């Protein structure tokens, strides 16, 4: 098995851990406070484990700054959509990220789609749809076309960010990309926090160890992702499918930590996700 495939599987595991720890963190502090301190701590950890952050070719700094803004914009649109949409519909629309990423990979990176890959993708998407149909939270919310459109834009921005990773890592290292990306992202989040004028209680934040855990998971997980992207043989289309393993892991963690319901049904549906991924990896 190629090293980059293992790295993406590890990334999928850490994505699930990030989501769980972030959910725990936001129960103690607002999402804006959590994100500002989370990215700042991640920035510090990234600086500690990276040796070449200042030897970067500075002509790529504007592109990294753009990537950070795109991620921020995607998050803001996604948060706006989540506030007004049913969670089940939100999950369905989120699947569009796969379609956007695959299309952009073909158009901008020249990656090829085989019949087997398409079949595997369809199986994965069907599995994701079925998993989302078991989510019944937020039925009191409305799903306007405006909100759905905003979230589609958010998903497109996330896909653009994934393509930028692949492009940037042809010229800079994983450590450089991670540090400068987190630097700009933390600046953006702190600006938002100041605009929101939220009260910052350092003593209270210090007790929220979930922020620290999320930061550690973020740095390690993103480092795996960037290392996989740095490998010239890695394919964004395949990596996008592998990332969906985080859905399966999140279902298990959701049951263990949050006592979520209908886990057996979700796990049975998620078997399709695994089958689709295995099909893509085994039959090339």
Image (spheres, rainbow, N blue to C red):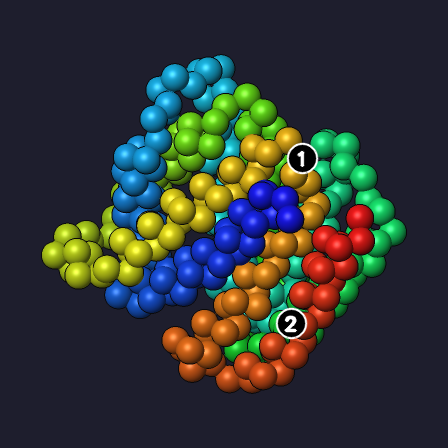
Say above or below: 216 vs 185: below
Give the image location of residue 245, x and y in percent. Answer: 59, 61
> Residue 129 at x, y = what percent?
69, 69
The residue at the point 38 percent across, 52 percent down is 217
Residue 136 quadrant: bottom right
Residue 258 occupies which quadrant of the picture?
Answer: bottom left
Mark 1 — residue?
233
x and y percentages locating residue 147 in the rendered image: 60, 58
- Name the outermost residue toward the front: 1
**Left of 172 or right of it: where is 277?**
right
Residue 22 image offset from top left, x and y in percent: 37, 60
Q: Is residue 253 above or below residue 72?
A: below
Precedes in sequence: disc 1 or disc 2: 1
Q: Which mark is residue 256?
A: none
Which callout, 1 or 2, points to the residue nearer the camera? 1
Instruction: Say few, some or many: other residues with alpha carbon within 10 Å of mark 1 (under 14 / 14 to 19 / 20 or more).
Output: few
- Residue drawn at (38%, 37%) of the image: 182
Query: Between marks 1 and 2, how big is the CA–CA gap?
Result: 28 Å
Q: Is residue 197 above or below residue 66?
A: below
**Would you say 268 lies left or right of 56 here?**
right
The residue at 51%/38% (across/down) is: 226
> Is any atom of residue 192 visible in this view?
no
Q: Which residue is mark 2?
A: 270
- Camera-side residue of 269 and 92: 269
Q: How many neighbours does mark 2 have within 10 angstroms: few (below 14), some (14-19), or many (20 or more)?
A: many
């Amino acid at each position: 098995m190629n090293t980059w495939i293992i790295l993406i599987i590890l990334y999928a595991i850490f994505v699930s851990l990030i989501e769980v720890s972030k959910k725990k963190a936001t129960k103690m502090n607002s999402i804006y406070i959590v994100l500002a301190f989370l990215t700042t701590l991640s920035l510090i950890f990234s600086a500690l484990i990276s040796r070449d952050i200042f030897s970067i070719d500075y002509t790529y700094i504007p592109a990294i700054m753009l990537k950070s803004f795109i991620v921020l914009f995607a998050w803001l649109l996604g948060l706006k959509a989540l506030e007004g949409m049913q969670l089940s519909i939100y999950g369905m629309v989120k699947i569009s990220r796969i379609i956007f990423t695959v299309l952009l990979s073909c158009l901008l990176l020249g990656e090829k789609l085989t019949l087997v890959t398409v079949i595997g993708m369809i199986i994965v998407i069907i599995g994701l749809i079925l998993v989302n149909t078991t989510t019944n939270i937020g039925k009191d919310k409305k799903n306007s076309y405006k909100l759905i459109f905003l979230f589609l834009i958010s998903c497109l921005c996330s896909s653009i960010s994934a393509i930028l990773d692949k492009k940037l890592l042809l010229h800079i290292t994983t450590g450089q990309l991670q540090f400068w990306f987190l630097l700009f992202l933390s600046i953006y989040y702190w600006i938002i926090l100041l605009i929101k004028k939220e009260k910052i209680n350092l003593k209270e934040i210090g007790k929220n160890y979930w922020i620290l855990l999320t930061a550690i998971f973020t740095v390690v997980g993103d480092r795996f992702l960037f290392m996989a992207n740095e490998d010239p043989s890695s394919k964004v289309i395949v990596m996008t499918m592998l990332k969906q393993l985080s859905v399966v892991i999140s279902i298990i963690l959701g049951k263990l930590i949050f006592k979520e319901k209908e886990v057996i049904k979700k796990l049975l549906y998620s078997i399709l996700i695994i089958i689709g991924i295995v099909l893509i990896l085994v039959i090339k």
